[in-house]
Image (cartoon, grey):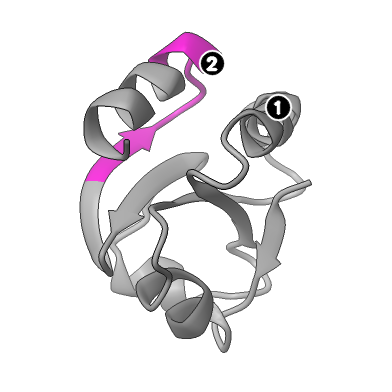
């Protein structure tokens, strides 16, 4: 399972992490977000030790999504060395996410 992030833990878990971090910004009422859930969980297992995968509920944690300009969900942001290196908005295929990870994270 992906790590559940909060605004308070974001800096330590994402920005200060030695590994690249893929953050899924989502909400429980969002159908496309729920559809992406199993894909995110699969990626968590497939990239264990290479990429940290985390989820942030935008309703419970409004500060961080606002800081990164999240206007639509689901939005996936890949952080590396504390910096945003890639962003994908909307429900996308697992292969699209894997391609992005192989190009930008590994």
- Disc assigned to residue 42: 1
Q: Is residue 34 above or below residue 67?
A: above
Q: Earlier in the sequence, mark 2 or mark 1?
A: 1
- Disc assigned to residue 94: 2
Mark 1 Cα shell of 10 Å, populated few (<14), some (14-19), many (≥20)? few
Q: Position of residue 18 (x, y in %)?
A: 39, 67
The answer to which quarter of the image holds residue 66 is: bottom left
In which quadrant is the C terminus drawn? top left
Q: Which span is picked out in magenta?
A: 86-96
Q: Residue at x 49, y 43 (%)?
A: 50
Say whether residue 39 is left or right of residue 81. right
Contact? badges 2 and 1 (CB < 8 Å): yes
Residue 67 colored in magenta in the image: no
Q: Position of residue 105 (x, y in %)?
A: 31, 40
Which residue is at the front of the view, 86 or 33?
86
**Residue 72 in sight here:** no
Which residue is at the front of the view, 40 or 28?
40
The answer to which quarter of the image holds residue 32 is: top right
The answer to which quarter of the image holds residue 57 is: bottom right
Q: Residue at x 47, y 10 (%)?
A: 95
Say whether residue 45 is left or right of residue 52. right
Quick one: SS at disc 1? Answer: helix
Quick one: SS at disc 2? Answer: helix
Q: Residue at x 57, y 89 (%)?
A: 8
């Amino acid at each position: 399972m992906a790590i559940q992030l909060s605004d308070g833990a974001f800096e330590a878990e994402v920005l200060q992490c030695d590994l690249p971090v893929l953050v899924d910004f989502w909400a429980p009422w969002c159908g496309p977000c729920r559809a992406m859930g199993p894909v995110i969980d699969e990626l968590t297992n497939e990239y264990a030790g290479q990429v940290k995968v985390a989820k942030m509920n935008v309703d419970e944690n409004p500060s961080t999504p606002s800081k990164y300009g999240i206007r639509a969900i689901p939005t996936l942001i890949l952080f590396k060395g504390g910096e945003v290196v890639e962003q994908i908005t909307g429900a996308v295929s697992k292969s699209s996410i894997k391609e992005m990870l192989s190009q930008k994270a590994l």
